[in-house]
Amino acid sequence: MRLAGLVALSALLAADAAGAEIPQAERRSGYSFMAPDTRAMQDDDTTNPAMLWVLDGEKLWARKTGVTNKACADCHQDARASMKGVAAHYPAFDKALGRPVDLEQRINLCRATHQQATPLPYESRELLALTAFVAQQSRGAAIEPGSDPQLAPFVAKGRELFMQRQGQLNLGCTNCHDENWDKRLAGSAITQGHPTGYPLYRLEWQSLGSLQRRLRACMTGIRAQAYDYGAPELVELELYLMSRAKGMPLEAPAIRP
């Protein structure tokens, strides 16, 4: 973030607002904050660049790999049926690990356990492609984070991180996305921060990216130390954000500015 942007951000958030969370009835997808031409790109799969990753993911779904020489399709068959609604329930609790995992981690766990293949690196085209392909099968499904009571303490940890001030700018996620949404910062709309479209294609990135990439970018923007990819704190924050967006339709793979 440039110096001018930092100055604008500091000025915008100098005074605390009430700090209350956004009422469920007032929650809006980032889609509603976009310009009409950007919305049109998302609405038409032939102009949505994220669909290139979905096509790659479809091929990877059917490709045999690893020591077992198995493909995702060998266990899960047709993703249009077996993966329908799945992404809307992640992050989910993993009993073996005793903690929540997000969709990218679940894919890698399946690779390691069932295919005996090397886990795919975070933000690699292959992992993003498989995640986008799986997530697309849940497009339009209502976000419904896991109801497992074992998730409750992790949701609470994610909420705490969302509210926590950090970094040189001493800001928390809530200062932008609860207290100042629908305002503008350096010409860009401040949204409510709901993760309805991930993985998504950002025009700023000229690439597909995960929710963790976006969270890390926000942390860097407020001059805080970003957590490593896959860190429990990022998964807990993802879990809280999904619980915060409960009932909203999944748009993956979406487009954002």
Image (cartoon, rainbow, N blue to C red):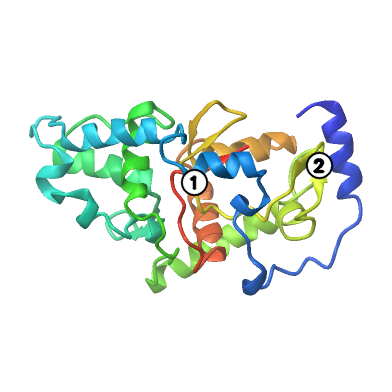
Q: Which residue shows up at 67% across the image and 43% down it?
A: 35
The answer to whether residue 30 is seen in the rendering is: yes
Identify residue type, mark 2: Leu
Could you say which disc has been placed on residue 43 in the image?
A: 1
Residue 37 picture quarter:
top right
Measured Cα–Cα span from mark 2 to mark 1: 26 Å
Image quadrant occupied by the N terminus: top right
Q: Secondary structure at mark 1?
A: helix
Residue 253 spot, x, y in % from top left: 44, 43
Label for residue 185?
2
Mark 2 or 1, closer to the camera: 1
The crowding category of the residue bearing disc 2, from other C-alpha atoms within 10 Å (few below 14, some 14 to 19, many at least 20), is: some
Q: Are marks 2 and 1 in contact (CB under 8 Å)?
A: no
Q: Residue 56, position in %: x, y?
A: 30, 30
* Image coordinates for residue 242, horizontal then vertical, percent: 51, 59
Q: Identify which residue is drawn at 32% across, 42% down.
A: 133
User: Horizontally, is 78 left or right of 85 in the view?
Assistant: left
Sequence-wise first label, 2 or 1: 1
